[in-house]
């Protein structure tokens, strides 16, 4: 077997095996070292740079001893896949369910998630999105501080466990998306900088130095991340990737790294004969991210729609701190439903500048819409969910707006039954000093938002992680069971009503700020919502359909071109 490693900062590299070190040939003119060794899958190995202590392989496929331990060889061809008949699934028209492997099941493993797939099938979703699973420090974490990007977290079940989960999802008719983090690596166990210029101080990001996508010696860096994306899709059979915080991909190349990723993933999709897609998280409100390459865009298939979330959340909760300070009107919610971006070149008081650009010519299916996700719940000081912040009536209204919106809807684990368990920020840094800095930094961050530091749970505490686990007894108890049934009926209605999943923006969205109502028309379907505390007669027009397809409360009636809605209720007419 040939071992290859890019280490332009080293003069000599040795392959470290249990039988002893083996000198590697190199470097070649691009900084690569290589050597042939007669070893097989399951063997542990590492690299020694200029005689220093052994380091894991930057492309390690398996880290059973953690981020600082040796790498282990893996034979991807040895797994017995059963999904040869899986034809894939287009993202447009899907309903996505985001989950965190460590808290989704009592076991907190890939196999534990397999045992809960029946719930997702019964719910009606068809795409599962996993928070990052690349090897990160310690036993628990969100996964956004991963450092071994090619190695599934050993605490979740390692490579074999992840393959079993993807295989089981496909057997259940579920597509699978993986959240990947290419904008930074975690602070602990990050050895890439010792190998080569993976990072650059020419740019700064919230996480420190930026990834070197466009500087000197950046070609192997770009190749490292592109190959990683292709590995998850090819070797692990994922159907798509969610790209974390692409606004931190600082790249002035003629071909942006996002475009390169889109091209290479498209080529792989043609080769494997099934749809593969990329979803971006972007804070730019820049339509180029999801515009086709033929029209001058990067060609990413879709992106998260934070403006829709912020508009909906602010209307429901009346919160006005942080970025919610510039949201809160029904008019903004209507604008987000009508074109995704609220800030489309308009002035943003939060940013103190103009922000965004109008997303002209884009389908609504280029955006994912949601009420909750890991960020919007977990980045609150106490991790409380929307079900804690608003009334049951408004929670049903919000679910209807998400699942009847023109976007690809996304639900966050437990949202469908109004989980009472929080989703907190938790870590397990083994370096006591790093753990202390993370805990103190978290408290300082939320103090600026008005939360008392003592109210912010310690991310390093076992109890913080334990509190975030879903309680699977809740769906069988009131009021959770009724909310779960409401989500099931909404998803079923979306599935059976083409106008709700056609990916087109609404024909119209009308609101009354004083009356606290909203009407959205999507072809033959009308969604009428009352977000106020009193009953209202909402005008829907004499020409609109008069039958009630679904209503969140009793007492809904249609007559004379209007629909009578009880307080905090919603009705779908068709």
Image: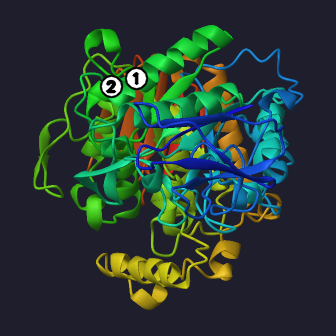
Q: Is residue 227 left or right of residue 153?
A: left
Q: Is residue 412 left or right of residue 210?
A: right
| Residue at x 56%, y 60% (from the top left corner) | 51
User: In x, y percent, where is residue 429?
Assistant: 58, 74
- Using the numbered discs, state the Cα–Cα distance from disc 2 to disc 1 in whole angstroms: 37 Å
* Label 1 crowd bin: few (<14), some (14–19), many (20+), radius 10 Å: some
- In the image, 542 versus 432, the foreground residue is 432
- In the image, 74 versus 326, the foreground residue is 74
Mark 1: secondary structure? helix
* Label 2 crowd bin: few (<14), some (14–19), many (20+), radius 10 Å: some
Q: Which numbered disc, 2 or 1, marks the residue closer to the eye? A: 1
| Residue at x 87%, y 30% (from the top left corner) | 78
Image mark for residue 143: none
User: In x, y percent, where is residue 12?
Assistant: 51, 48
Image mark for residue 260: 1
- Rendered view: 335 above or below 446: above
Q: In which quadrant is the C terminus drawn?
A: top right
- In the image, 353 versus 316, the foreground residue is 353
| Residue at x 28%, y 28% (from the top left corner) | 287
- In the image, 491 versus 37, the foreground residue is 37
Q: Earlier in the sequence, mark 2 or mark 1?
A: 1
User: In x, y percent, where is residue 245?
Assistant: 39, 46
User: In x, y percent, where is residue 95?
Assistant: 61, 33
Q: How many marks?
A: 2
Which quarter of the figure has residue 241?
A: top right
Image mark for residue 508: 2
């Amino acid at each position: 077997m040939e071992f290859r490693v890019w280490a332009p900062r080293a003069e000599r590299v040795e392959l470290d095996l249990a039988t002893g070190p083996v000198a590697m040939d190199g470097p070649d003119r691009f900084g690569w070292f290589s050597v042939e060794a007669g070893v097989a899958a399951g063997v542990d190995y590492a690299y020694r740079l200029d005689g220093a202590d052994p380091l894991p392989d930057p492309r390690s496929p398996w880290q059973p001893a953690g981020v600082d331990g040796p790498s282990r060889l893996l034979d991807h061809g040895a797994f017995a896949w059963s999904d040869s008949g899986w034809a894939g699934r287009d993202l447009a028209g899907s309903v996505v369910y985001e989950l965190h492997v460590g808290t989704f099941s009592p076991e907190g493993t890939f196999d534990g998630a397999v045992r809960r797939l029946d719930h997702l099938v019964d719910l009606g979703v068809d795409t599962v999105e996993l928070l990052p699973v690349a090897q990160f420090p310690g036993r628990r974490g969100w996964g956004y501080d991963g450092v071994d990007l090619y190695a599934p977290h050993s605490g979740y079940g390692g490579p074999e466990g992840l393959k079993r989960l993807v295989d089981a999802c496909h057997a259940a008719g579920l597509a699978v998306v993986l959240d990947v983090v290419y904008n930074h690596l975690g602070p602990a166990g990050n050895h890439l900088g010792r190998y080569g210029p993976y990072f650059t101080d020419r740019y700064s990001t919230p996480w420190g130095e930026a990834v070197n996508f466009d500087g000197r010696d950046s070609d192997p860096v770009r190749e490292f991340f592109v190959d990683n994306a292709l590995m998850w899709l090819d070797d692990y059979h994922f159907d798509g990737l969610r790209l974390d915080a692409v606004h931190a991909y600082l790249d002035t190349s003629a071909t942006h790294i996002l475009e390169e990723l889109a091209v290479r993933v498209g080529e792989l999709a043609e080769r494997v004969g099934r749809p593969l897609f990329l979803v971006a998280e972007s804070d730019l409100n820049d339509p180029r991210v999801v515009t086709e390459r033929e029209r001058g865009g990067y060609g990413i298939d879709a992106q998260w729609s934070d403006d829709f979330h912020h508009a909906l959340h602010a209307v429901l909760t009346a919160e006005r701190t942080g970025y919610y300070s510039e949201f809160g009107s029904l008019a903004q919610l209507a604008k987000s439903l009508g074109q995704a971006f609220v800030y489309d070149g308009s002035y943003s008081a939060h940013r103190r500048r103009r922000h965004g650009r109008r997303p002209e010519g884009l389908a609504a299916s280029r955006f994912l819409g949601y009420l909750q996700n890991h960020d919007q719940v977990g980045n609150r000081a106490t991790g409380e969910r929307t079900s804690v912040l608003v009334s049951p009536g408004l929670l049903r209204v919000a679910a209807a707006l998400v699942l009847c919106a023109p976007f690809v809807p996304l639900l966050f684990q437990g949202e469908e039954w109004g989980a009472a368990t929080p989703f907190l920020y938790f870590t397990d840094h083994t370096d006591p000093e790093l753990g202390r800095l993370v805990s103190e930094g978290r408290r300082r961050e939320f103090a600026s938002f008005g939360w008392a530091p003592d109210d912010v749970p310690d991310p390093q505490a076992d109890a913080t992680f334990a509190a975030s686990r879903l309680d699977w007894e809740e769906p069988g108890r009131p009021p959770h069971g009724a909310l779960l049934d409401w989500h099931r009926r909404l998803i079923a209605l979306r599935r059976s009503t083409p106008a709700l999943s056609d990916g087109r923006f609404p024909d119209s969205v009308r609101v009354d700020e004083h009356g606290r109502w909203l009407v959205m028309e999507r072809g033959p379907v009308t969604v009428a919502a009352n977000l106020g505390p009193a009953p209202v007669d909402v005008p829907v027009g004499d020409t609109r359909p008069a039958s009630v397809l679904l209503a969140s409360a009793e007492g809904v009636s249609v007559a004379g071109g209007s629909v009578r809605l009880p307080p905090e209720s919603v009705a779908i007419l068709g």
